[in-house]
């Protein structure tokens, strides 16, 4: 299949436009989605009119409306500008969308709604109310699927797959990835939800990561290779369901595991992965699991201070060297 170079945000916008053209039930809802601060939905209203719906500043309100629309046959894609704002919509997402298929008619109801969330990047002047990494919060709820793509190709293919799903999905997009460029297949394609991707093969240690930190892990792996340490780097892509098979297969090969994420350690993705490997693959390990995560902090409102709190390549390299 031929490909073209797109930025991450262009890939997201292309996925939305293609799915709206393919299926008239697909609608977009959220705050400022016609102008759009992130440009992911900008100008789509020119082609799709009233199917792009600017909503009042009430995440709880328009998330609930989207769930109702989904249950009556529509396929809403809801933009929630920042992960922090998902707390306003948490009841609609975790107590309603996640449960209806279990509660009503033995699965008769479907809730095909996607919540797009411009996540993380927790440094900069936006401060503590606009930059948390809360994706691990929602892996706790059965009935939800949680996706966090790391490349333009994966973002487009996974978003298209999410829109076609009959289950509620949280689709995170790291805002520092929006300008990252990559090759994206031309034409219609989808990627499987629930499958991780080995972005770099190696034999000495497994590094599991996702989103912006995944790129830091890849750079760290290249630096480690110069010192004779070959790291295998796994991109989770989907946080729930978790691709256990991919992780365990890699750990069985390398016998060492490092997780790297932008959220905090307590209750994070690294904690879930470490627990799973300890339960199902302990015999593979010949060293303790290392978790690299953000500081236990309230996010600083400056770029300099913010960078001090989130994991960098050096932190990943240090964790690997403590094992190898």
Image (spheres, grey):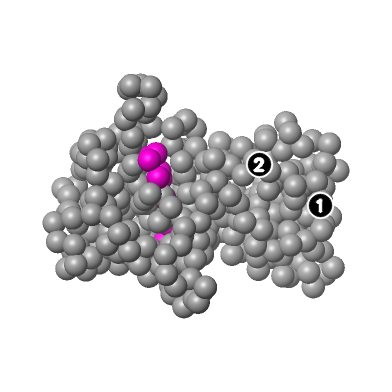
Number of residues whose C-alpha sits closer than 10 Å to that of mark 2, classed few (under 14), some (14–19) or many (20 or more): some
Residue at (65% x, 52% y) in the render: 208
Q: Position of residue 206 (x, y in %)?
A: 74, 53
Farthest-out residue, left:
50
Quote the CA–CA distance across marks 2 and 1. Answer: 15 Å
Q: Visible in this render: residue 181?
A: no
Q: Is residue 64 above or below residue 13?
A: above
Q: Which residue is mark 1?
A: 254
Q: Magenta stretch: residue 171 in it?
A: yes
Q: Position of residue 91 (x, y in %)?
A: 32, 31
Residue 196 vs residue 249: left or right? left
Secondary element at tag 2: helix
Q: Is residue 35 above or below residue 171?
A: below
Who is closer to the viewer here, 231 or 243?
243
Is 112 on the left-hand or right-hand side of 69? right
- On residue 244, the disc is 2
Please say if 195 is above or below 2: above
Q: Is residue 146 left or right of residue 271?
A: left
Q: Which structural element holds mark 1? A: helix
Nearer the viewer's eye, disc 2 or disc 1?
A: 2
The magenta segment: 165-176
Residue occupying the point 51% across, 48% down: 193
The C terminus lies in quadrant: bottom right
Residue at x-position 32% and y-position 22%: 104
Upstream in the sequence, badge 2 or badge 1? 2
Q: Position of residue 214 (x, y in %)?
A: 59, 59
């Amino acid at each position: 299949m031929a490909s073209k170079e797109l930025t991450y945000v262009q890939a997201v916008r292309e996925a939305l436009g293609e799915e709206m053209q393919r299926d008239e039930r697909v609608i977009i809802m959220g705050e400022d989605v016609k102008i759009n601060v992130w440009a992911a939905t900008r100008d789509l209203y020119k082609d799709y009119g009233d199917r792009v719906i600017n909503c009042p500043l009430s995440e709880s309100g328009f998330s609930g409306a989207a769930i109702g629309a989904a249950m009556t046959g529509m396929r809403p894609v809801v933009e929630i500008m920042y992960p922090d704002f998902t707390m306003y919509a948490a009841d609609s997402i975790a107590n309603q969308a996640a449960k209806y298929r279990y509660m009503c008619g033995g699965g008769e109801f479907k809730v095909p709604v996607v919540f797009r969330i411009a996540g993380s990047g927790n440094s900069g002047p936006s401060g503590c109310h606009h930059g948390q990494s809360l994706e691990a919060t929602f892996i706790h709820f059965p009935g939800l699927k949680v996706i966090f793509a790391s490349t333009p190709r994966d973002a487009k293919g996974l978003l298209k797959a999410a829109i076609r799903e009959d289950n509620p999905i949280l689709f995170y997009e790291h805002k520092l990835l929006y300008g990252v460029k990559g090759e994206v297949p031309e034409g219609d394609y989808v990627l499987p939800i629930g499958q991780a991707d080995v972005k770099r093969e190696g034999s000495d240690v497994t590094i599991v990561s996702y989103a912006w930190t995944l790129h830091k892990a890849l750079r760290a792996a290249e630096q480690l290779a110069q010192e004779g340490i070959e790291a295998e780097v796994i991109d989770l892509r989907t946080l729930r369901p978790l691709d256990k098979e991919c992780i365990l297969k890699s750990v069985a090969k390398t016998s060492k595991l490092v997780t790297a994420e932008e959220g905090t350690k307590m209750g994070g993705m690294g904690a879930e992965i470490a627990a799973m490997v300890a339960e199902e693959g302990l015999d593979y390990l010949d060293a303790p699991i290392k978790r690299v995560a953000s500081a236990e902090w309230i996010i600083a409102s400056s770029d300099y201070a913010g960078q001090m709190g989130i994991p960098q390549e050096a932190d990943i390299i240090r964790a690997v060297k403590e094992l190898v």
